[in-house]
Amino acid sequence: MGRQRKRILSDGIQSHTEDKPSLPPPRKEKKKKTDLGKVFINISIGLCIFSLIWFFYALYMRSTQAKRVVTLHPSPRVLDANSSSAEVSPQRFWGSYRPQVYFGMKTRSPLSPVTGLMWLRQFSDVDVNLRHTCEQGDRLQGYGWLMHDGKSFGVQEIRDGDFTLTTEFVKRMGGDHGGDWTWRITAKQHSSTAHAPVISLMFYVAMDTQGSLQSHVEERNRLSTVTGFSEELGNFKVTFRKPTGGDASTAKYASYNYLQTVTPGLEKLSDIVKNSLNRRFVFNPPTGERRPYIAVDTYKPPHHHHQQKSADTRKESDFVVHQVTVQTPFQIEVLFESGSFHDRPDQLAGSVLTEELEKRKETFDQKFENTFGLQAKGFTQSQVKFSKAALSNMLGGMGYFYGQSVVQSVYNEYPLLYPEGPLFTAVPSRSFFPRGFLWDEGFHQLLLSKWDPQVTREAVAHWLDLINVEGWIPREQILGDEARSKVPHEFVVQRNENANPPTLFLALQELVEQLTAQPNAPSTQGTLPFLRRLYPRLQTWFEWYNTTQVGPKPNSYRWRGRDKDTNAFLNPKTLTSGLDDYPRASHPSADERHVDLHCWMALASGIMTKVAQLLGEPHQEYEHTHETLSDNHLLTELHWSDQLRTFCDYGNHTQAVELQQEKVYVPPGQPRHHFPVARLVRSVRRAPKLQFVNALGYVSLFPFLLHILRPDSPKLEHLLRDMRDPERLWTPYGLRSLSRTDPIYMKRNTEHDAPYWRGAIWININYLAVRALHHYGNLEGPYQGQAAALYQELRTNIVSNVYRQYMETGYIWEQYSDSTGRGQGSHPFTGWSALTLLMMAEQY
């Protein structure tokens, strides 16, 4: 029965299905389909909501990341906001803090009035040879500070054609705004000159958006004084005394002119003067012919056709120029007097000025000998004078800058303005690099810390106060319109993935050693509180290197920021390493390991350990990092090439590269000038592979230069042998940067890019080499005698050549030829090339 009922029921259903329209699906199935649809809709809505949340979160995170590059470090600044003010630091308030001009002064404040000197030779073959900013194109026979104590006085000599200008200044404390100062300019013709030159000196005062100036004229057109007022200086007066014959007694005939106008920016001062010059004036001395001369008149802005009104919205500021035209020899004094100096004993002029200058010179000489002891070492008076110039030019090249860097991160579509800030720093070259460079400054402060540790503490503090929340410091500081006007556009933007060698740790090492050796000396009293305020920023800075510059293998490091266009360069540059075009892996990749950065981090971790111990802070992590990075077995594993028998970078590399002229196809009958000019591009004859980069040069020496190698390491013997080999690194003038046997030795990187770190002698690395030889020459080990002998020879070669070139050319140079020893590159370069003085003094 059951089966029959089942059959009938089945048949019935079958019949019902065939004979009648279909019924809706059972309620159960409908519910099931409805539930699936809802689930699908809910999932879709959820995904949309999640996508929107993720989108806005990503936007928020990108916006947050984009802001980090311009967000300053949250810890208290090392220096108080008023640390450079006249109230807190009166002795350093005024100074020659405008290294980019031949002679000028300003205060260490953001909106300082500026004073300066321009000059031109009248009746010359050149139409208008105006001198103002330091330019290599001016082809002066020499200029620079002969004496400068960094605080109260300076003496500079400028040789220009057939005459010499000596610029001197003296400061005197008093009142509430940094006291008074006086300039003395002495002009003398050279003995070989047939006719006494007629020179126009142009002294100027300019405000920087704050305060006002008032001119006071006598005798129709002679500007006698300028009075002014600013919030920081209060009332002040600048007096232009009449010229004398150089002995402060004989009056000289002079013609006078002046200009009073406004300027939209301090970088425009030269242009304003040039566009105000006129030939309608007549020079009419008591004896001699009447001649028209060039002088400032009415300022007429240059007219440019089809140019709309400038979009420059900066506030215009007062600008006053006093011109005096006189025949050599002569002497002129310019006095600045503070309105708050009420108990002034007498004017700082004439014999009073002469007496003060002599006192300062005598004090300088005594301090110099006490500090460096060169006379006691047997150096000649001429050599001592040269060494004083080396120090004085670095002190006189200290600049105070204020402004904003232009920065960018990968999260920013366009560059951003960094927060405004000050920087008190030495500069590498007044003519070519009159601004702050991070890796140069560590070398600068090695010298200045011997002379005045307070200068070093302030400079390092200014640099670390520019650090952002990430721990990054822009490596090139281009602050203010004057500084920016001297920099090619492509170098202005600073990118936050790019480092620079952390050489400030060298200066900190020196300060720590001074404190340890003389804890109670007056010069070291400020070091411990300075380190305590510096420490939070120092920690973040070290950590930034230790995270953003890590390499592909544990405890390896890699410079970021290598040039991307590999076809354009014989070897893509690594500007961030400081060694620019030194040959690295031919094909940049994330697989690279850089031995110099490894050694910098070993040095930095060791100094972090010492600073933490001094401050009673936890130091074990830094100590562990230092021990790891200094492990000679690890260094060998990561960077020693048994084949090349030296330390090397590692990366995707081939030596089979050369520059060749690219082929540009020009169809028959077509004019050639319609097609691109053929360039030199890189040709790769053999594919690169991961391997050691077979270049022997400065990078190979870093384990030795920074004292990472143990004194008994057999690797040390190989490096000493390579250093002394004339076919490799040795020259009679110092160590060359790249071995003569290297395929890239003295090769151009592009058709327009001459070799830079590919053979030339650089003094900063040679200083490290001499220092390292002194170090190993005083440590027990199998190579002690070899290092000591090499030390004496290398030190003598470097000092002799730098001195000889200074005497022959009038300059200390950026680099020196490895074949002739001649100075080359930018000049004067009294940044790290001035370290020659420390080699003379044997102070490491």
Image (cartoon, rainbow, N blue to C red):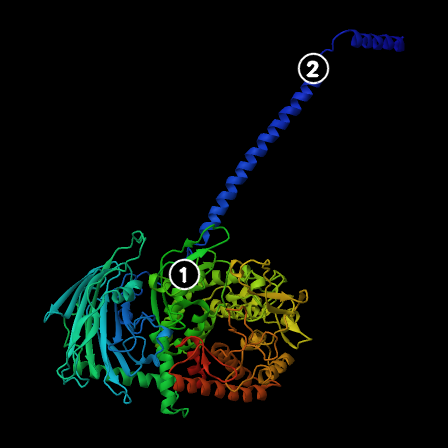
Instruction: Report whether 667 appears left or right of 193.
Output: right
Q: Is residue 538 above or below residue 707?
A: above
Tag 1–tag 2 contact (CB < 8 Å): no
Q: In this figure, which residue is indicated by the disc labeled 1?
A: 466
* Quarter-of-image position of residue 286: bottom left
* Quarter-of-image position of residue 661: bottom right
Q: Nearer the viewer, residue 645 or 137?
A: 137
What is the three-letter code of the residue carrying label 2? Arg
Q: Secondary structure at mark 2?
A: helix
Q: Is residue 779 above or below residue 442?
A: below
Instruction: Report whether 384 appears left or right of 21.
Output: left
What is the three-letter code of the residue carrying label 1? Leu
Q: In this figure, which residue is indicated by the disc labeled 2?
A: 27
> What residue is shown at x 37% (from left), y 87% (from top)?
384
Instruction: Report whether 463 appears left or right of 288.
Output: right
Which quarter of the rendered picture does the N terminus lie within? top right
Residue 252 in the image, given as x and y percentages of width and height: 15, 82
Q: Secondary structure at mark 1?
A: loop
Dot placed on the residue nearer the N-terminal end, 1 or 2: 2
Q: Is residue 41 above or below residue 242?
A: above
Q: Crowding at label 2, few (<14), some or many (≥20) Cα neighbours within 10 Å?
A: few
Q: Crowding at label 1, few (<14), some or many (≥20) Cα neighbours within 10 Å?
A: many
